[in-house]
Image (cartoon, coloured by chain):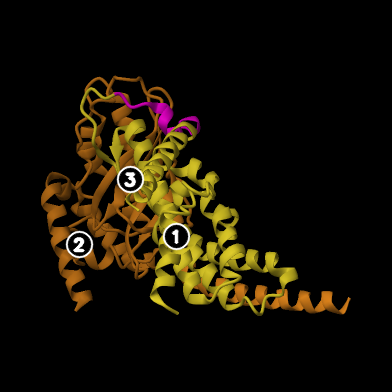
């Protein structure tokens, strides 16, 4: 296994195939919990943990899982890791558990995890699969943390609970509500897509 | 048909391994989760006594009409460090729900969880009034030594008598002797006393009752004594 391939699998999820900004997967938790920056990090890390371990286990078992029952097998594996995350978070991070609530259990049906299991881990050896899970997870974490910083800044005037706005700033309540989530997700998506397109054009021009 | 059975068995194996893993994690996390839930449920008790586990105490509450529930506060080692009360007082505008904590022969805090008293009247003085309970000696008379909120005498009296009843219960039923009373040092009886062993502490309680008048005059000094003694005891325990 050469480093090139591992690095490619890792960086793939962060930029080229960023689950939120490029693949537009996992929109449900993204819209629901990104009203607070700490939620973004918490949800991102929980998802990353599940992604890495479900990718690893599915990759290890890819020859033991018959094609016909792969979907229920994936569900069992993913649900197991989600339950572990949920119990650990409930036990050691009660505040985060309370704010994320039902969305921790709903990581089970996060399409990013399923997509990576089906399209990557089931066909690739364990090490690359771990890197893929890690990259996708970090990409997801970065994306939703960015989005939740924007929403928290506009909606409450703070980022990670610290005030960043001048006195006269009146928080826009809509930014922390679901409707504002859609609007800001769209806007952030446009900005990020624009930036990536520009950097690609530059690269091509340099060639 | 045979293939279906084969696939079924394989899937069952996966599920079995998953269940085993979950059982292990559950075994590790069940205890902290229970503690967290307990703390969340008893947030008002945590506010008056501190971050402990609260276990409801079963017992006869006849004669204590203002006490709705009594809890023993346990530290992580499971030792009882104090008692918390949920109280209900008849205020000016209806029921006042409050909680109070008692530890080492002194009141650790009083907080109001819900009330229907006149808004504005007295509510501004509420924080100062409630804070004044902190540190007073845990004997029923001391509760009345706290100055009432001006303009809200009925509310003040309601809270004072509810707290007083809690302290009476702490002294008489739980055997938590008022600080500085009797022949037995208070710390030895207070945190270590189990509700079941009341018979042995009866004498102490009586002794404490005689000492009450003195204690009421010098509540601050008594609280300090208790605190110092408690620190000493804790040191011994650790050693």
Q: Is residue A134 above or below residue B125?
A: below
Q: Which residues are magenta?
A: A170-180
Label the yellow chain with its letter. Answer: A
Cα distance, mark 3 to mark 1?
Answer: 58 Å
Task: Residue under label 1, please give it.
Answer: A12
Which mark sits nearer the N-terminus, 3 or 2? 3
Lateral position of residue B217 relative to residue A105, left or right:
left
Tag 3 subunit: B
For the residue labelled by badge 1, is the local secondary structure a helix, a strand or a loop? Answer: helix
Q: Nearer the viewer, mark 3 or mark 1?
A: 1
For the residue labelled by badge 3, is the local secondary structure a helix, a strand or a loop? Answer: strand
- Frontmost residue, B203 versus A127: A127
Dominant SS of magenta comes to helix
- Confirm whether residue B95 shows in the render: no
At x 46%, y 44%, the residue is A33
Cα distance, mark 2 to mark 1?
Answer: 76 Å
Q: Quadrant of residue B75?
A: bottom left
* Quarter of the image with the N terminus of chain A in it: bottom left
- Confirm whether residue B77 shows in the render: yes
Tag 2 subunit: B
The residue carrying pointer 2 sits among few (fewer than 14), some (14 to 19) or many (20 or more) residues within 10 Å by Cα, namely some
Task: Residue under label 3, please give it.
Answer: B100
Task: Residue under label 2, please give it.
Answer: B182
For the residue labelled by badge 2, is the local secondary structure a helix, a strand or a loop? Answer: loop
Where residue B55 appears, as percent x and y from the top left, is 43, 58
At x 38%, y 56%, the residue is B173
Cα distance, mark 3 to mark 2?
Answer: 25 Å
């Amino acid at each position: 296994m050469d480093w090139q391939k591992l690095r490619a699998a890792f960086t793939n999820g962060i930029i080229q195939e960023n689950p939120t900004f490029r693949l537009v997967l996992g929109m449900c938790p993204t819209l629901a919990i990104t009203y607070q920056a700490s939620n973004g990090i918490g949800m991102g890390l929980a998802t990353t943990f599940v992604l890495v371990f479900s990718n690893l286990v599915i990759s290890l078992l890819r020859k033991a899982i018959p094609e016909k029952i792969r979907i229920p097998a994936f569900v069992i594996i993913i649900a197991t890791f989600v339950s572990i995350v949920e119990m650990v978070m409930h036990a050691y991070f009660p505040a985060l558990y309370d704010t994320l609530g039902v969305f921790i259990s709903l990581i089970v049906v996060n399409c990013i995890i399923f997509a990576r299991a089906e399209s990557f881990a089931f066909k690739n050896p364990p090490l690359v699969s771990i890197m893929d899970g890690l990259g996708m997870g970090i990409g997801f974490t970065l994306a939703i943390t960015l989005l939740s910083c924007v929403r928290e800044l506009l909606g409450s005037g703070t980022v990670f609970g610290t005030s960043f706005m001048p006195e006269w700033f009146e928080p826009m309540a809509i930014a922390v509500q679901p409707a504002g989530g859609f609007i800001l997700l769209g806007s952030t998506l446009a900005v990020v897509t624009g930036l990536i397109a520009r950097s690609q054009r530059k690269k091509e021009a340099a060639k | 048909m045979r293939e279906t059975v084969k696939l079924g068995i394989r899937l069952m194996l996966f599920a079995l391994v998953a269940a085993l893993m979950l059982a292990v994690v559950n075994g590790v996390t069940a205890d902290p989760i229970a503690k967290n839930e307990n703390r969340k449920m008893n947030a008002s008790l945590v506010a008056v006594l501190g971050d402990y586990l609260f276990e409801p105490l079963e017992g006869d509450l006849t004669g204590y009409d203002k006490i709705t529930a009594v809890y023993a506060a346990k530290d992580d080692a499971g030792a009882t460090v104090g008692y918390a009360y949920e109280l209900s007082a008849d205020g000016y505008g209806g029921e006042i729900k409050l909680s109070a904590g008692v530890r080492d022969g002194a009141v650790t805090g009083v907080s109001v969880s819900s009330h229907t008293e006149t808004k504005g009247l007295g509510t501004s003085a509420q924080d100062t009034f409630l804070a004044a309970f902190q540190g007073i000696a845990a004997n029923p008379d001391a509760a009345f030594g706290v100055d009432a909120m001006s303009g809200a005498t009925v509310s003040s009296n309601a809270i004072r008598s509810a707290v007083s009843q809690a302290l009476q219960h702490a002294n008489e039923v739980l055997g938590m002797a008022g600080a500085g009373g009797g022949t037995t040092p208070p710390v030895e009886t207070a945190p270590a006393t189990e509700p079941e062993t009341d018979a042995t502490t009866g004498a102490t309680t009586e002794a404490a009752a005689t000492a009450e008048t003195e204690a009421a005059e010098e509540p601050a000094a008594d609280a300090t004594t208790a605190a110092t003694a408690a620190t000493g005891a804790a040191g011994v325990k650790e050693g």
